[in-house]
Amino acid sequence: MNTYKTSEIAAAIGVHPNTVRLYEELGLIPKPQRLPNGYRVFTELHVEQFRLARLAFRVEVLQNGLRKKIVQMVKSAAAGNFSTALLLTQEYIAQIQQERANAEEAIQIVRQILSGTPQKNLHLFKRKEVSEYLGISMDTLRNWEMNGLLAVRRRQNGYRVYTDKDLQRLKVIRSLRCANYSLEAILGLLSQLSQNPDVDIKAALNTPKADETIIAVCDRLLTSLSAAEENAKQMLCMLQGMKAANS
């Protein structure tokens, strides 16, 4: 069995030795054995775990708990809980696919708005109903409203009610937040889109340009999610191999 010193495994992975120590401290790799002189001894399992972690963190998808889930997956693998790590990766892929569907739906909603298609308000929803339907917290809804992203009507008793039109707008905001747009940038985006019906929304989300303020902070959501899904599929294969090798 091949073994490595800290400097050797750092060179093999292509990182600084301090990064090796940091990954150990954060629980992203298994605790290495130590020689009587205190030197760490790393194995091929550590090499594979490093590769897994670097693949997992290659694409920064931070919103909606995706980052937290992938960190949890890496830590589970580092602890030798490969079955848990596999399950978390499968959940991660499912959530990415849902975010992609959300983004595609948001694109269609905006196109309908820009085309002048009438938006009917056939239903009224309470905040809790909207929160559960969209999968976002009520605190998040309040924050968006306080920052001017949505003006919600109130009934005579003071309770907020959301219309179908409000839900459409919230779906767009949800995807833009997943793309790491700031609240200020979303305001600008919604404003400029209303003034430019010819804009290609999907291209804007995928290929932001420095001179287009409406997409100044876009993290290429659709492209990032696709890349993250492909990486996650590779992670599944790696985890299956690691589980088999250590069972």
Image (tube, rainbow, N blue to C red):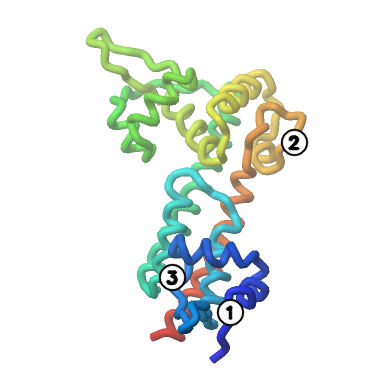
Q: Position of residue 34 (x, y in %)?
A: 46, 80
- In this view, the residue farthest toward the left is 157
The residue type indicated by label 1 comes to Lys
> Which residue is pictured at 63% across the width and 38% down the height?
218
Look at label 2 and name its amino acid: Lys
Q: Position of residue 225 (x, y in %)?
A: 57, 51
Q: Position of residue 63 (x, y in %)?
A: 48, 44
Amino acid tagged 3: Ala
Assess whether mark 1 and mark 3 are in contact (beta carbons under 8 angstroms). no
Which residue, given by chain and number where applicable, does mark 1 sit on? 5
Q: In the rendered image of this protein, does residue 176 appear above or below residue 41?
A: above
Q: Secondary structure at mark 2?
A: loop
Q: In the drawing, what numbered circle is on residue 192?
A: none
Label disc, if present, on residue 78 of the rendered structure: 3
Q: Please, is residue 2 above or below residue 184 in the view?
A: below
In the drawing, does residue 207 fall left or right of residue 41?
Answer: right
Judge by depth and name the residue closer to the eye, 217 or 21: 21
